[in-house]
Image (tube, rainbow, N blue to C red):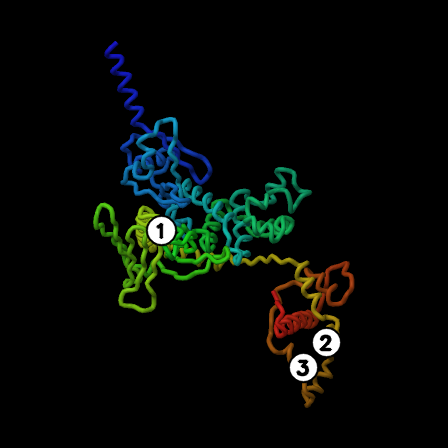
């Protein structure tokens, strides 16, 4: 009995020294692992690598949530440093949560060697795009939605034939909520997105799903709040709200101020201009770190104080911000240092990828347009087009004048003002007149029951008339967009 009690006591002691860790993936799946009380972050990462079946996560790191912010783990530190007293008092019944998140954003998905890791990267970026508030980049969201549809569905025609959706050509094969931010759906309406989304999707027909995924990753890197990790800071220690955001982005470090829900860029530090990061520990309780930016700038943090100052330069004032704690400051600086190192190690490979993409883009250049014709028609109709329609007709008659009349003008008759406007420049008209019957109805107040066919001089006059309307509205101070 005594030996049996000792075994039970030993088993109980071992269980008390074990902890259950749950790792949440960008795909909303999770992984579970059991570690000891003295385990470090590296051990958890090895479990993730084994379960995913990859040798290196490259751009991903393990993160913990502190004060509603993701802070990336130092893999050589013990997990007890991140979970505090709960870790020592915990048990196998209560899991400790870690997150697998993108730590280093990339401009090209080709830098990610593993297809599984590339898929995880794409998945997290998709969710980030849906939460984006970059309202000034509305056109980019339509491109991203088209790329995502091609990456996840493939060619639309094939799917329609396979599922018998031929009657619903432009609807019912995707939900706008899955591909557009909520504010854009509210602004444009679901019908508008369901109408124009498939049109842009069709433009990518023939693109493989992996190619479309790479295109999405490349386009998303241009989104202001897309491929970036934000850390909130305060300008004053006693302020309640943190209105300063330090962003660790693809091309460098950006500092924003939040004004009315919008991000206003204050400072932009490129990775190529960063010389080095150095950390200097002064004592067990106080950590001081120095960051040298632009080879002549430095940043210092003491406790929750984070400073960026110019050395031997007056072009940048001393920037002083405050983080929630010294723990935050230390991990933010570490993330900056690791991101800078990652960029420097991959810049040569990225340069080669850019050259290859430039060559491919020269042979595969396309343009697609999304236009709210109802809104444009309404705005144009608000202008006084009645009086100017006669001028448009006069311009058309002048453009189609007889050869004899042209010879008379050459003999000394001055050309009209309309002729001067038409001869001002030679243009190639991209828009097909047959595709805009609503314009004929607007200018001539006639019903169009067949495609509009105009001669080149006539179409030139119509186009010039539209320009005159926009010029006049601009001079009167009215909006023209």
The residue furthest top is 1
Q: Which of 78 and 114 is in front in this view?
A: 78
Measure the C-alpha gap from mark 1 to mark 3.
Answer: 65 Å
Q: What element carries label 2?
A: helix
Q: Which of 474 and 233 is in front in this view?
A: 233
Of callouts 1 and 2, which one flags the residue occurring earlier in the amino acid sequence? 1
| Residue designated by label 1 | 323
Pinpoint residue 247: horizontal percent, then vertical percent: 40, 54
Q: Where is residue 412 in the image (x, y as percent from the top left)?
A: 68, 90
Which residue position holds label 2? 391
Labels 1 and 3 touching (C-beta < 8 A)? no
Q: Nearer the viewer, mark 1 or mark 2?
A: 1
Rate crowding at label 3 as few (under 14), some (14 to 19) or many (20 or more) other CA atoms within 10 Å.
Answer: few
- Specify whether 370 is left or right of 346: right
- Outermost residue on the bottom side: it is 412
Earlier residue among tags 1 and 3:
1
Question: What residue is pinned by disc 3?
Answer: 417
Q: Position of residue 318 (x, y in %)?
A: 32, 63
């Amino acid at each position: 009995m005594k030996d049996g009690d000792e075994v039970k006591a030993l088993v109980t002691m071992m269980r008390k020294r074990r902890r259950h860790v749950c790792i949440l993936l960008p795909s909303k799946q999770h992984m579970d692992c059991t570690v000891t009380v003295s385990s470090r972050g590296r051990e958890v990462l090895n479990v993730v690598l084994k379960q995913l079946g990859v040798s290196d996560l490259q751009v991903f790191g393990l993160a913990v949530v502190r004060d509603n912010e993701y802070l990336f783990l130092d893999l050589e530190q013990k997990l007890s440093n991140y979970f505090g007293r709960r870790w020592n008092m915990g048990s196998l019944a209560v899991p400790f949560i870690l997150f697998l998140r993108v730590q280093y954003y990339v401009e090209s998905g080709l830098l990610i060697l593993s297809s599984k890791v590339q898929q995880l990267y794409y998945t997290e970026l998709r969710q980030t795009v849906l939460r984006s508030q970059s309202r000034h980049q509305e056109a980019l969201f339509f491109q991203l939605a088209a790329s995502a549809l091609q990456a996840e569905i493939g060619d639309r025609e094939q799917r329609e034939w396979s599922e018998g959706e031929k009657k619903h050509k432009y609807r019912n094969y995707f939900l706008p909520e899955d591909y557009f931010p909520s504010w854009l759906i509210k602004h444009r309406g679901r019908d508008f997105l369901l109408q124009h989304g498939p049109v842009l999707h069709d433009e990518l027909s023939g693109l493989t799903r992996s190619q479309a995924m790479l295109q999405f990753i490349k386009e998303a890197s241009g989104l202001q709040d897309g491929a970036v990790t934000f850390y909130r800071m305060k300008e004053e220690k006693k302020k309640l709200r943190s209105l300063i955001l330090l962003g660790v982005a693809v091309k460098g470090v950006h500092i924003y101020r939040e004004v009315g829900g919008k991000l206003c860029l204050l400072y932009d530090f490129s990775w190529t201009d960063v010389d080095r990061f150095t950390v200097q520990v002064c004592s067990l309780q106080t950590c001081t770190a120095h960051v040298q930016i632009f080879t002549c700038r430095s940043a210092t943090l003491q406790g929750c104080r984070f400073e960026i100052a110019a050395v031997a330069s007056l072009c940048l004032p001393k920037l002083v911000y405050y983080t929630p704690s010294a723990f935050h400051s230390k991990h933010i600086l570490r993330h900056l240092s690791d991101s800078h190192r990652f960029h420097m190690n991959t810049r040569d490979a990225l340069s080669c990828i850019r050259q290859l993409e430039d060559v491919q883009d020269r042979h595969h250049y396309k343009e697609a347009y999304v236009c709210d014709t109802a809104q444009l028609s309404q705005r144009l109709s608000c202008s006084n087009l009645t009086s100017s329609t006669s001028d448009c007709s006069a311009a058309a008659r002048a453009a189609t004048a007889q050869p004899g009349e042209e010879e008379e003008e050459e003999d000394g008759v001055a050309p009209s003002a309309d002729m001067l406007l038409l001869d001002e420049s030679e243009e190639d008209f991209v828009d097909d007149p047959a595709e805009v019957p609503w314009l004929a109805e607007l200018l001539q107040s006639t019903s169009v029951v067949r495609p509009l066919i105009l001669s080149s001089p006539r179409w030139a006059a119509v186009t010039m008339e539209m320009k005159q309307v926009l010029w006049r509205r601009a001079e009167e101070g009215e909006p023209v967009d």
